[in-house]
Image (cartoon, rainbow, N blue to C red):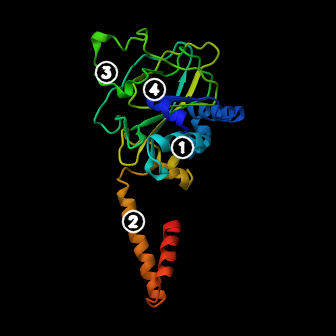
């Protein structure tokens, strides 16, 4: 993200990026996810549910990774995608259900800022495939609530959760827009009141590799149908230090093999070159 976007995300707990997808991309995705919803048997097994099929290329879309690298981890291999679902709502459908918000020690919902960067915990990415009008059914937020010091989750006497409390805000955006928010910000679904089109939105929950909120529920055949580059977003939970240990072990194997091949007659300069190659390609 650029510095302006970082400041907005840190200040509000969410950011809206309008019209990230082209009109043709939006139409293709809409057609596909509605087919998944209404006629899944018409698709191959590995495309019958998200994140399979046409949606897969959005898993690591540059606009998504641009944000996630700043708020979860700068390394792609440390970012997991642990939940995806389609939100489809006709006129009048929906609910008002505020949740999250405020400080917590739970790593899934904790929002922190340390040493010049954001650590947002679980982060929601929403692809809006139809027009959203402000106050007409898009996701609603209490901006800044991800850093609230008071307990706003159970503060009945202050009536913060009432929709007309004056502190909730939403957004307008064209089809193909991207909404990204920290799970730590207090947010709510709303009733869809846009008479021009239904809500068609794909919700994704990204998290750090060493924590998990959702119970695993992806169909194995769907994950197996993804490319290796996309499959890595569905690794099991573990601490990245194990990657470092594996890299070190691999480097030692290369050094031993090189020493054996050259009869232990490797000068310091050649060892430095080997080390550089191992770090780059090993």
Tag nearer the camera, 4 or 1: 4
Which residue, given by chain and number where applicable, does mark 4 sit on?
A: 12
Residue 191 placement (x, y as % from top left): 49, 15
Which residue, given by chain and number where applicable, does mark 2 sit on?
A: 246
- Residue 181 visible to the viewer: no
Cα–Cα gap, marks 4 and 3: 17 Å
The mark nearer the N terminus, 4 or 1, is 4
**Secondary structure at numbered mark 4:** helix
Tag nearer the camera, 4 or 2: 4
The mark nearer the N terminus, 3 or 2, is 3
The mark nearer the N terminus, 2 or 1, is 1
Cα–Cα gap, marks 2 and 1: 25 Å
Q: Residue at x 49, y 32 (%)?
A: 7
Which residue, given by chain and number where applicable, does mark 3 sit on?
A: 153
Do the numbered discs 2 and 1 sit on residues whose CB atoms are within 8 Å? no
Which mark is drawn over residue 65? 1
Which mark is drawn over residue 209? none
Q: Is residue 237 above or below residue 258?
A: above
- Residue 132 visible to the viewer: yes
Residue 180 placement (x, y as % from top left): 50, 32
């Amino acid at each position: 993200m650029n510095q302006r976007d970082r400041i907005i995300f840190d200040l509000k707990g969410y950011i809206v990026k309008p019209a990230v997808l082209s009109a043709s991309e939006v139409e293709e995705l809409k057609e596909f996810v509605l087919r998944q919803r209404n006629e899944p048997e018409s698709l191959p097994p590995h495309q019958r549910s998200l994140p399979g099929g046409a949606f897969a290329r959005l898993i690591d879309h540059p606009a998504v990774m641009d944000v996630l690298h700043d708020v979860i981890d700068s390394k792609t291999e440390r970012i997991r995608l642990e939940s995806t679902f389609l939100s489809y709502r006709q006129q009048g459908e929906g609910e008002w259900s505020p949740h999250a918000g405020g400080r917590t020690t739970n790593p899934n919902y904790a929002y922190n800022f340390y040493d010049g960067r954001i650590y947002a915990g679980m982060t929601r990415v929403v692809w809006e495939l139809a027009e959203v009008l402000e106050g007409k059914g898009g996701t609603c937020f209490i901006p800044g609530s991800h850093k609230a010091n008071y307990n706003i989750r159970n503060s009945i006497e202050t009536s913060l959760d009432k929709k007309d409390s004056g502190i909730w805000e939403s957004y307008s955006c064209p089809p193909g827009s991207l909404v990204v928010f920290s799970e730590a910000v207090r947010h709510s679904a709303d009733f869809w009141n846009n008479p021009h089109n239904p809500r068609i939105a794909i919700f994704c929950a990204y998290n750090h590799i060493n924590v998990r909120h959702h119970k695993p529920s992806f169909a194995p055949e769907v994950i197996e149908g993804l490319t290796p580059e996309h499959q890595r977003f569905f690794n099991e939970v573990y601490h990245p230090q194990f990657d470092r240990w594996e890299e070190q072990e691999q480097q030692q194997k290369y050094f031993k093999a090189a020493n054996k091949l050259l009869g232990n007659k490797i000068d310091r300069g050649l060892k430095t070159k080997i080390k550089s190659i191992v770090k780059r390609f090993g």
